[in-house]
Structures are given as C-alpha cells and as structure tokens.
Amino acid sequence: MVSATPFATHPVVDILRFNTCGSVDDGKSTLIGRLLYDSKSLMEDQIEALERSADITGGGQINLANLTDGLRAEREQGITIDVAYRYFATPRRKFIIADTPGHVQYTRNMVTGASAANLSIVLVDARAGIIEQSRRHTCIASLLRIPHLVVAINKMDLVGWSEARFQEIRAQFEEFLPRLDIKDVKFIPISALNGDNVVEPSKHTPWHPGPTLLSHLETVHIASDWNLNGFRLPVQWVNRPNCPTNSRLHDFRGFSGQIAGGIIRVGQKVIALPAGMTSTVKEIWTLDGSVQEAFCPQSITLVLDHDIDISRGSMIIGLDNLPGANVNLQAKVCWMHPRPLQRGKKYWLKHTSNMVQAVVTEIEHRIDMATLEPQAAPSELALNDIGEIQIRTAKPLVYDGYATNRLTGSFILIEQGTNATVAAGMLMPPHEIVKPENGDYVI
C-alpha cells in the first residue's frame, strides 16, 4: 500500500524548485516517477491508474514515466512534449518539480520550466555520454543563473556500473563547465529505472560515497539564493479595499505585488519610479495581517506616507543599490518561435509587471551549441537559438542585471498582432542607474 504524503503534515521550512533536462530518452520522466514512487508520494488511485492503463512492461515493472507524461502523444511516442509539474514533500523539504522536454524542438518548453528553478538536474545516458543537447541544456541553466546543478549519469546498469565510464563522462563535463557561470555542481551515478542512488544508496556503486539524489535535494543550501540586497517591488495593482465596516481601513490605498529583491521595513524610505518621488513606508500588509518587515519573495501591500502617482508597471525601490534605467538595453535571449528574430522588428517587451514597445536594433552574436563559442553578427536567430542582442524601448526601463536579480533582470518578448511569446531574455548589467536630482529621483 502506497499512501500520499500531504504537505501539511511536514514541518517544512522551505521549498526547492528543480527541473530535469537532458536529451530525448535519457530518463527524465522515469527519474521523477521513481522519486515520487520511492518517497511514498503517490496516491493509491495513481498507482491503480497506472496498472489499469496497461503501463506494465514485459518485465512486470510499472512505467513510471507515465506519471509525468500525461499527454496521449507523449505516451505513444515515448517523449516529453510539454512541461509537467509535480509536487511532493519529505520531512526536510517541499519540492516542486518541472519535467521538461529533451527534444531540441521543445527547447523553448525547457526554458519555461527551468526559469524559476533553484536547481537543475541534467541527465546523461551513460552509454551515449555528452551530446549537443547536454551542452545546450547546461548552457541554458547557466544563462538562467540556476544556482545549483546536478549531473545525473543515468542507466549506469547498462554499462556494468563502470566507475571508469562515470569518471570519463564527468571529465567531459568538466572540460566545458569553466566557460559557464555555474558554481555548485554535483555528479551522481544512478539508475532511474531500478532506483539505484535515487532515494536509497546502491550496492552497485561502492566507489560512490554519496549522497543519493534525494539526499542532495533535501540538503542543498538555497536560503541565500534570493537577492536580499536592494529592495524591489514591481507594483501589480493598487489595492483599495474601502471597507465600510472598519473605519481604520476606510480609504485604504496600498500598492500590491511580490517583492523581487531586498528587505522592507516600516519607516524605511523608498522611491516610486517612474514618478521619481520619495516617501516613507507607513504600513506593510500580508495575507496574515500587518507586519513590521517583509522580504523577497513575499507578496505584500505597501502603504506609503504620501499620495504618489503609482500604478501597475511602476516599481517601488529602496534608496540603496539603485537599479538601472535606460531605453537602450543589452540582453541574452533564447528564441522560441519558428519565425526567426530579425533586426528592426517591433515587439512588446514584458518586464515584471510592466509592458513597453521595443525594437531589436542589433543581433551581436549567436552561441554555437557544439563548442559553446559565440558566432559574431548573425543575420537572424532561429528557433531555439541563443544569442546576444540590443533592444531599444519606447520608454526607460527600470531594471537590474540578470546576474544580480533574476526577477528584475528577466523579460519576455511578445509578437505584436499574435500575442505569441517569442523569446525569453536576460538583461546585462546596466550602464546608467537612477540618479537623484533636486531631492527627487529621475530616470
């Protein structure tokens, strides 16, 4: 009997978001199924549904990949097409998993699933070793500034649990890792199908001192992943409860959103942009009521001492570690549309809660996935290409470099007319910052 483990029963202190990536048939969906199955995180009806739907292999094993591959096309072809999210918990931590596609055609879906991850698991087939998709997905993880990387060398049972093969693949990875900005990398030999080194240690790898994959996921340090330097609150909406039954809340006017960086306290001075005026925090409200301080990534409502023209798309920031402000932007993008990116085309640029018109003025280079070297001045970026571009917006954008703040340093490009999301972008560090002038701040 396999019982579910609900979130509410665990004294969990934080949530780890991670994604699985790698090439087709490297075992990503099977690995997630194994994690859910062996950690006792499946409902009885989920197990019964697998058994009823002819998901038993010739060897009598449940096809664990079908726990995430829910689309009929995915089951028929044996590949992941769309991003599938799954949730489970252990006594140490909650987990949100994004199972992302491995096929090059669906690289854009991989970018979507990995965009909010704290950790990325890159699976490698021990028989095939490092291939182009392995490099592509590792490069994307680096561009997205995912702080932690696990290289899970899968199907070790098919190479006789060879330590030499494990070390050979590890050496191949370590050849190109210095070109990427990933600080925390862990290599783990596994068999997702049989469960070796996934939840329980394997007797087949006495040469691997540990940890298992789940043990590493439970203990990897993520508390410092959030940016707590420089307060940022992109305003999502103006909160006007106008509660007639509570005179204290009558004519309440606050500014709601999710903190994208830093810490805010009652009495702290802030700037509202693009209004460019300063004020003081009078109250901080959360779902649980009034608090004296809040921090990233909490969702809050700020009440200020002064009536300032603030609306959706504005940003409230602290006086220290000021952001950049410019109409000329430089960014790295992953192109996600069959129609290629070309110079001079206009798009909508969505940044936090702000939407502005933008035009691509220059394509500086494209990354060669075989060598991870830049190819200078390409004429266009095609589907799944990664490159560096220059953009000019219709009005100044208030932003941070993506390396400093993943939330205020990222954006998407939207095609005008179709409203199709065509690119995910990471902004380079700003050359100009918000400047004070006559007591107020201008951009």
Image (tube, rainbow, N blue to C red):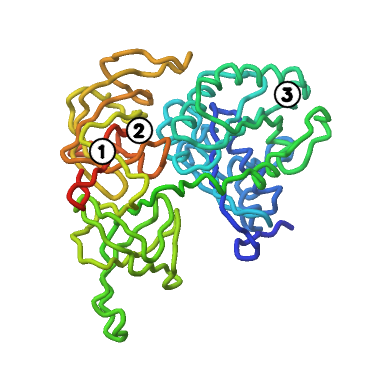
Dot 2 corresponds to which residue? Answer: 429
In percent of width and height, residue 432 lies at 26, 35
Mark seen at residue 158: 3
Q: Are marks 1 and 2 in contact (CB under 8 Å)?
A: no
Q: Is residue 257 above or below residue 414?
A: below
Res 48 seen here: no
Residue at disc 3, secondary structure: helix
How crowded pointer 1 is (Cα within 10 Å; few <14, some 14-19, many 20+) is rated as many
Mark toward the start of the polypeptide (3 vs 1): 3
Nearest to viewer (mark 3 / mark 1): 1
Q: Is residue 300 above or below residue 71?
A: below
Mark toward the start of the polypeptide (1 vs 2): 1
Cα separation, mark 3 vs mark 2, equals: 46 Å
Q: Quadrant of residue 48?
A: bottom right
Mark toward the start of the polypeptide (3 vs 2): 3
Mark seen at residue 414: 1
Res 304 seen here: yes
| Position of residue 7 in the picture relative to residue 347 (left or right) | right
Relative to the observer, which residue lies in front, 292 or 77? Answer: 292
Nearest to viewer (mark 3 / mark 2): 2
Cα separation, mark 3 vs mark 1, equals: 45 Å
How crowded pointer 3 is (Cα within 10 Å; few <14, some 14-19, many 20+) is rated as few
In percent of width and height, residue 385 lies at 37, 23
Residue at the image point whose x is 77% and y is 21% from the top: 162
Q: Quadrant of residue 35?
A: top right
| Position of residue 156 in the picture relative to residue 363 (left or right) | right
The amino acid sitting under disc 1 is Ile
Relative to the observer, which residue lies in front, 188 or 65? Answer: 188
